[in-house]
Image: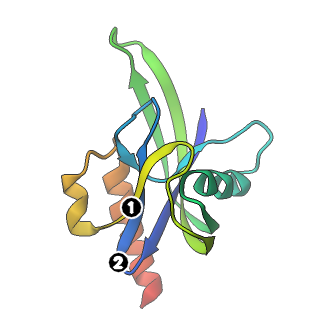
Amino acid sequence: MLGVGALIFDAGQVLLVERGHEPLMGWWSLPGGVVETGERLRDAIMREVMEETNLAVEPLEVVEIFERLMHDAEKRTEYHYVLIDYLCRVTGGDLRAGSDSSKVAWFGREELTTLKLTEGTLPVIEKAFGIHESKQS
């Protein structure tokens, strides 16, 4: 399954969503989700962010392409995702949890290690912090 994720920064913090449904219910991750058949990647990231956070965004650049295999109790592959994570800029909207998220919140770098984050999320956020900070200078 092809998915997209958004790395959105404001005042030195990154926006995360707490997943409201399986898979990964209760885990914090980047706003995003599965690309629908026939949907362009740019449109998918804008739609997913709006659905989960009520924010309009503009995708700026690809930060990471990540593969995630999730297994069931018998160690069989249950989900196989290829995720494309984009650095995005907010262009409108009012932040609030949407249909697939139970919470949305901004977190500073120092708080990230205290969260129940989905696999691979922390390294991608760290990489994006570096890209974001270099664009701010």
Which marked residue is nearer to the observer: mark 2 or mark 1?
1
Q: Secondary structure at mark 1?
A: strand
Q: Residue at x 35, y 78 (%)?
A: 12
Determine contact: label 2, label 1, CB under 8 Å: no
What is the C-alpha distance between the residues marked 2 and 1?
13 Å
Identify residue for label 1: 105
Q: Residue at x 58, y 42 (%)?
A: 3
Amino acid of disc 1: Ala
Residue 35: give its label: none
Q: Report the residue that reaches farthest toward the top.
A: 74
Quarter in which the N terminus is drawn:
top right
Q: Report the residue that reaches farthest toward the bottom.
A: 137
- Dot 2: few (<14), some (14–19), or many (≥20) neighbours within 10 Å? few
Q: Position of residue 46 (x, y in %)?
A: 66, 58
Q: Position of residue 51 (x, y in %)?
A: 61, 51
Q: Position of residue 44 (x, y in %)?
A: 68, 50
Placement of 59 over or under 33, stated as above or below:
below
* Quadrant of the image occupied by residue 2: top right
The tally of labels here is: 2
Q: Residue at x 41, y 66 (%)?
A: 128
- Dot 1: few (<14), some (14–19), or many (≥20) neighbours within 10 Å? some
Placement of 58 over or under 83, stated as above or below:
below
Placement of 47 over or under 78, stated as above or below:
below
Residue 12: give its label: 2
Q: Report the residue that reaches farthest toward the right.
A: 38
Q: Position of residue 59 (x, y in %)?
A: 63, 66
Q: Nearer the viewer, residue 119 or 53?
A: 53
Amino acid of disc 2: Gly
Q: Residue at x 22, y 63 (%)?
A: 111
Of the image marks 2 and 1, the number of the one nearer the N terminus: 2
